[in-house]
Image (spheres, grey):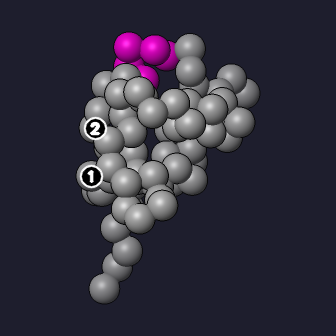
Amino acid sequence: MERATPENKDYLMPAEAVEYFVLSRRKFSEWIQKESSPFLIAKYGKRKLINRVAFEKYLNEHPELRRRD
């Protein structure tokens, strides 16, 4: 059985989101510390999970958040 890829998942772990959306780890960790983040909607125990679809919409509205290479 193959593992699900980030584009096929509904929820992403923070490390997956950073890699998939090409984000700065430092900035992203600051964003997920805010409880009012519109894309942080699930917790599994102590883990924070990111709704991939909601976060994609948020990034489309805020393109400046992506990492500059």
Contact between marks 1 and 2 (CB within 8 A): the answer is yes
Location of the C terminus by quadrant is top right
The crowding category of the residue bearing disc 2, from other C-alpha atoms within 10 Å (few below 14, some 14 to 19, many at least 20), is: some
The verdict on residue 7 being magenta is: no
Task: Work out whether residue 6 or residue 50 is closer to the camera in this orientation and state it.
Answer: 50
Q: Which residues are magenta?
A: 59-63
Query: Residue flagged by tag 2: what amino acid is it?
Result: Val
Residue 26 appears in view: yes
Q: Which residue shows up at 57% across the image and 53% down it? A: 15
Q: Which residue shows up at 30% across the image and 56% down it? A: 9
68 over 20 or under it: above or below = above
Main SS category, magenta section: helix
Location of the N terminus by quadrant is bottom left
- The numbered mark at residue 53 is 2
Residue 54 relative to residue 61: left or right: left
Task: Work out whether residue 47 or residue 27 is closer to the camera in this orientation and state it.
Answer: 47
- Whole-number angstrom distance, CA of label 1 to CA of label 2: 7 Å
Task: Work out whether residue 41 or residue 26 is closer to the camera in this orientation and state it.
Answer: 41
Q: Quadrant of residue 5?
A: bottom left
Query: Residue flagged by tag 1: what amino acid is it?
Result: Asp
x then y, percent, for residue 42? 33, 49
Q: Number of numbered discs present?
A: 2
Q: Quadrant of residue 43?
A: bottom left
x then y, percent, for residue 13? 47, 55
The crowding category of the residue bearing disc 1, from other C-alpha atoms within 10 Å (few below 14, some 14 to 19, many at least 20), is: few
50 over 69 or under it: above or below = below
The verdict on residue 61 being magenta is: yes
Q: For numbered disc 2, what is the local secondary structure? A: helix
Q: Answer with mark 1 or mark 2, whichever residue precedes in sequence.
A: 1
Q: For numbered disc 1, what is the local secondary structure? A: loop
Q: Which residue is mark 1?
A: 10
